[in-house]
């Protein structure tokens, strides 16, 4: 608690000293789930980058020390008192924040959520990291890059009922069927490791043995991904079978180093913070109001449109490979 | 022929034959399955289950059960992984020693409650199972220990080869044989059978039941600790949910191997063969490309079939005891 108060006092002192100097600047608060979290530190980096690029924006990075909704409510209350120009928040709870964010909006401070949403009533738009179609298409593209757009590959998924994974695999199949670029690639099997290391390993092993021409394994789950990579290594297929999928850089770095994994993806926190600031700028400047079909130009991320229910989607996940893995594996 | 007859009559013999037939049948459906490579990977894959099923068998034999074995694997594995991560220079035998010591400690904790205080094993181990799982999270802070954080020697040991087999398979076979000797040819083993058969009578003849039970839970915990290291090193990853549900697989292996769930009957060989059968099953089903739902159903059916055979066998024996000789 003392730490909390200390943070608040520090934030307050910062405001008091910084406010006169930034008189003309837009003050946008970036409230994260908790401080000291590598993922959100990276979000802040992206937000600061966007602020510099746009100019005339000051991003205030803040959040509670533990990931609680109460802590965030306190912070929003003080931000309202300080009359910031906009609030971007990754919510610890979608519903309990609605009352306070509504209050902020009544006072003329627009609120948007990113990463983890606030319920629709309590924000103008929500910025989601990605959507299933992007993810599915990108996974096929990454697999294509790894195996030279030619040959057999298989999927080691989570459980057979996992909603997310099944959607992604569905879009992967769509991309394979529709895009002529992938006509020489063949998805030979979809297997399920149930998010258990030993079962995923066994499934990967069976795939390797059963399909002697297999060139790739795609694992859209953070348990199946390293397990499949380990199976490829143990079978001595490094350089002949490549594994790709969705995973945290810190969990897969070892296999990138050993050339079992050439590339993989995950939503990039830097891009997330970066796009959020552009969107907030658009909201403050009355360019968008959260209606379906509106567009925001988000610098290097391109145009992002508003969908049903004020939902915005950043785009394809960020791609990690041997060149950038060292930078990222220490981040998250 | 009496040898062959005896073989077919015994559960171990039936299981060997059934496993072999199943193995060949899978081979006919998918010929790639019939290879030394497959046998090799099944032995490697089943080694941990063989060890764990053997110690579980001893516990079930004494009318107990140890549901903490999987959580023990996760916790001891995490201990080994964290030591390997923070002190990569630690010699491997010390890392393994630490995992074994952690398993031993958990075994002692179980033993105190079950053997000394006489609280039912299922209650103690059900509670302790969750506590140990929770400890994995506390110890690691919820973080994963990944392959790049483990030294090469740490990861290589289970799959390095000795006598043409992986270390993992060799350890599994050697320990199983040791456990077989322990249960068949030592006084300790015979006393465990006695406890399972009739605990009250065992007490009356002067066997220290508490001490034997204590020893058996500690032995199981220690073996769990060793398997913890083996598991983590083999899959090159350690996190809280490792080996989730594995404790039931060890019980299933025992049941398939003809170990009476009420205690008193069964053999280490049976439990180990049960483990091997499950290993063949787990490796064969993905190769055959059977849907995940059927995979679960097939494993379940195998266990059910074994239970039915077990109970039939026992009923017959009961009748024979009552028969009056004339």
Image (cartoon, coloured by chain):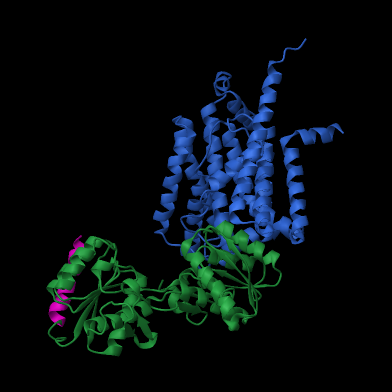
Chain colours: A green, B blue
Above or below: residue B229 compared with residue A8: above
Relative to the observer, which residue lies in front, A110 or A14?
Answer: A110
Residue B133 visible to the viewer: yes
Residue A19 percent location from the top left of the image: 14, 82
Residue A176 located within the stretch drawn in magenta = no
Asked if residue B112 can be seen in this view, the reply is no
Where is B44 relative to B201, above or below?
below
What residue lies at 54% left-to-right and 35% top-to-bottom? B215
Image quadrant where residue A115 sits: bottom left
Q: Is residue B276 above or below residue B181?
A: below
Instruction: Give the residue furthest to the top.
Output: B326
In which quadrant is the N terminus of chain B drawn? Answer: top right
Query: Is residue B291 left or right of A72 when viewed as pictured?
Result: right
Q: Position of residue B179 (x, y in %)?
A: 65, 40
Quadrant of image for the C terminus of chain B: top right
Residue B8 picture location, percent across and down: 78, 36
Residue A6 magenta-highlighted: yes
- Based on the displayed image, in which of its 4 quarters is residue B94 positioned? bottom right
**Closer to us: A144 or A183:** A183
Classify B29 as above or below A33. Answer: above
Q: How many marks?
A: 0
Q: Nearer the viewer, residue B323 or A1?
A: B323
Q: Magenta part mainly helix, strand or loop?
A: helix
In this orientation, which residue lies closer to the viewer: B299 or B73? Answer: B299
Position of residue B42 in the picture relative to residue B128 (left or right): right
Looking at the rendering, the stretch of residues picked out in magenta corresponds to A1-18
> Which residue is depicted at the point 58% across and 19% down?
B205
The residue under the point 44% across, 30% down is: B117
| Left/right of residue A99 with respect to residue A204 in the rendered view | left
Across and down, in percent, residue A284 comes to 22, 82
């Amino acid at each position: 608690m003392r730490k909390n108060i200390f943070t608040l006092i520090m934030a307050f002192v910062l405001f008091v000293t910084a406010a006169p100097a930034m008189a003309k600047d837009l003050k946008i608060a970036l409230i994260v789930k908790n401080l000291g979290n590598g993922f959100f530190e990276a979000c802040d980096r992206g937000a600061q980058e966007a602020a510099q690029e746009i100019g005339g924006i000051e991003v205030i990075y803040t959040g509670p020390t533990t990931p609680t909704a109460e802590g965030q409510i306190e912070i929003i209350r003080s931000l309202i008192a300080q009359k910031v120009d906009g609030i971007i928040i990754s919510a610890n709870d979608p519903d309990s924040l609605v009352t306070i964010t509504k209050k902020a909006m009544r006072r003329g401070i627009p609120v948007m959520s990113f990463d983890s949403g606030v319920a629709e009533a309590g924000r103008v738009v929500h910025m989601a990291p990605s959507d299933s179609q992007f993810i599915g298409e990108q996974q096929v593209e990454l697999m294509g890059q790894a195996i030279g757009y030619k040959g057999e590959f298989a999927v080691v998924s989570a459980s057979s009922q996992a909603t997310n994974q099944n959607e992604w695999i569905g879009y992967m199949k769509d991309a394979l069927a529709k895009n002529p670029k992938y006509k020489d690639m063949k998805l030979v099997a979809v297997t399920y490791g149930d998010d258990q290391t030993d079962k995923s390993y066994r499934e990967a092993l069976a795939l390797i043995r059963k399909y002697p021409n297999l060139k790739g394994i795609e694992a859209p789950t953070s348990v199946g991904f390293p397990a499949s990579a380990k199976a490829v290594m143990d079978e001595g297929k490094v350089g002949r079978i490549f594994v790709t999928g969705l995973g945290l850089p810190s969990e897969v770095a070892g296999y990138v180093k050993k050339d079992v994994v050439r590339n993989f993806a995950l939503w990039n926190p830097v891009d997330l913070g970066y796009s959020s600031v552009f969107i907030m700028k658009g909201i403050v400047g009355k360019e968008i109001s959260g209606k379906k079909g509106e567009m925001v130009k988000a610098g290097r991320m391109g145009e992002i449109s508003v969908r049903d229910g004020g939902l915005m989607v950043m785009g394809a996940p960020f791609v990690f490979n041997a060149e950038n893995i060292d930078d990222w594996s220490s981040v998250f | 022929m009496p040898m062959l007859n005896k073989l077919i009559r015994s559960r171990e013999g039936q299981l060997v034959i059934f496993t072999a037939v199943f193995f060949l049948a899978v081979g006919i459906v998918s010929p790639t399955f019939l290879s030394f490579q497959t046998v090799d990977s099944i032995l490697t894959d089943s080694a941990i289950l063989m060890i764990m099923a053997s110690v579980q068998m001893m516990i079930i034999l004494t009318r107990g059960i140890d549901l903490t074995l999987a959580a023990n694997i996760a916790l001891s594995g995490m201990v080994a992984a964290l030591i390997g991560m923070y002190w990569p220079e630690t010699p491997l035998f010390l890392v393994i020693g630490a995992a074994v010591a952690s398993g031993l400690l958990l075994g002692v904790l179980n033993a105190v409650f079950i053997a000394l205080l006489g609280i039912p094993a299922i209650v103690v181990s059900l509670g302790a199972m969750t506590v140990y799982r929770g400890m994995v999270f506390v110890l690691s802070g919820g973080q994963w220990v990944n392959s790049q954080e483990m030294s090469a020697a740490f990861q290589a040991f289970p799959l390095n080869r000795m006598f043409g087999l992986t270390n993992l398979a060799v350890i599994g076979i050697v320990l199983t044989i040791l456990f077989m000797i322990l249960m068949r040819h030592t006084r300790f083993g015979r006393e465990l059978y006695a406890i399972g058969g009739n605990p009250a009578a065992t007490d009356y003849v002067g066997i220290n039941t508490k001490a034997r039970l204590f020893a058996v839970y500690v032995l199981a915990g220690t073996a769990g600790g060793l398997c913890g290291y083996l598991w983590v090193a083999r899959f090159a990853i350690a996190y809280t949910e490792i080996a989730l549900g594995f404790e039931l697989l060890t019980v299933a292996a025992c049941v398939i191997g003809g170990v009476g769930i009420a205690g008193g009957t069964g053999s280490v060989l049976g439990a180990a063969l049960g483990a091997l059968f499950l290993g063949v099953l787990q490796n064969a089903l993905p190769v055959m490309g059977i849907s995940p739902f059927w995979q679960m159903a097939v494993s379940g059916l195998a266990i059910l079939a074994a239970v039915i055979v077990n109970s039939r066998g026992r009923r017959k024996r009961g009748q024979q005891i009552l028969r009056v000789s004339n």
